[in-house]
Image: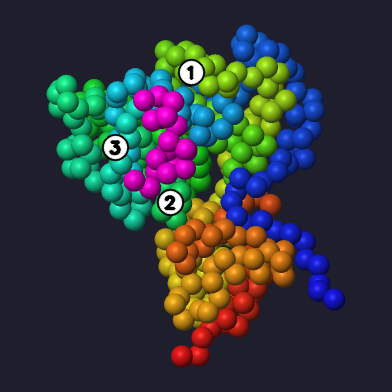
Amino acid sequence: MATIHPSVDFRSDTVTWPTDEMRAAMAAATVGDDVYGEDPTVNALEALAAEMLGKAAGVWVTSGTQGNLIAALTHAQRGDEAIMGEDAHTFCWEAGGMAVLGGITPRPLPTDQRGRMDLAQVQRAIRGDDPHLPTSRLILLENSSGGNHGAAIAPDYFAAIHGIAQAHGLSTHLDGARLFNATTALGLPPTAITQWVDSASICLSKGLCAPVGSVLVGSEDFIRQARRQRKLLGGGMRQAGVLAAAGIIALKTMTQRLQADHHLAQRLAQGLATIPGIQIDPTVVETNMVFFALADTVAITPAELVTRLSHNYGLHIGGYGDRTLRAVTHYWIQPQQVDRLVEAISTLVLAGRSHH
């Protein structure tokens, strides 16, 4: 009879569930009607996020995607253009929201292996005043760079982009879904990055373990306009303090322990690097994401590997196109589970290696 293993989910840090402390805080949360601005727990969360990110105000939103969309709709109008990296989450993974709902044209630019656009190309992408062309209005940024091994991008890049934006009257928005992972890896406070952008959104429901939600921060005027866009998108919530209570713990407590997730990601990368047929460079693993590929000599396909890990071992990882796979570490992953994943992948890959 097959051994039943407890299920361990490495597909993403979005699979995290709230901690016991969060559940207790949620049960005890003082609430009010947030659309009226009367939920004290939501108000406290928004103020905390704004303070941590060095901005004047914040607004609680349902998701990172909604936060990014609200930011785009607030900064830009129909017919405007937003410049972003071609592998940015805002371009690749948000259903084309800014174009579909806002009439904002995306202008994707190539990025380097860390997710950075070339500064000269950004400069050239800014349109002149010509009625044939959309109006350049916004530069969208991301940190950490999810499509690039979760790379933690240093402040100098954002400072340089800020300079270009300022010179041309453009706004900047940071998709900071995993900003605290990036700043933990860099050993810097979040403000080292956010000082160089007009607005930023942070996710509470990824490595920070809150069950749902993100916060968008910026100037008081920006947030006042953002609330209008949130309402337009159906994002106004009522007694949301039940959820926001977990978000406060996410920001105060969970942001302080992300280094542990990064150590586990490095442990996983180092382990995978010992397996013949696995292609990985552990030096690019800076945060909690581990991308690796199957060499052509490996007979098992990525899809088969994902399926067998799940069915035979209760271990879940994600496919990422071609022969690339991804595993993400988070609060609910233990060192022995990382080792178990390495051992299982080794068993399946070595059994599936071709002999020619």
Q: Mark 3 points at which residue?
A: 107
* Three-letter amino acid code at the position of disc 2: Gly
Q: What element carries label 3?
A: strand
**Residue 302 image point, x, y percent:** 54, 68
Asked whether disc 1 touches disc 3, contact meaning CB atoms under 8 Å apart, the reply is no
Looking at the image, residue 239 sits to the left or right of residue 170; the answer is: right
Mark 1: give few (<14), some (14-19) or many (20+) Cα within 10 Å.
many
Label 3: how many Cα within 10 Å (few below 14, some 14–19, many 20+): some
Residue type highlighted by circle 3? Arg
2 vs 1, front mark: 1
Viewer-proximal residue, 310 or 224?
310
Q: State yes or no: residue 91 in magenta.
A: yes
Q: Residue furthest top?
A: 36
4 lies left or right of 273:
right
Q: Is disc 1 placed on a helix, strand or loop?
A: helix
- Sequence-first disc among 2 and 1: 2
Residue that mark 1 sits on: 229
Left or right: where does residue 82 sit relative to residue 147? left
The answer to whether 80 is drawn above or below residue 278 in the figure is above
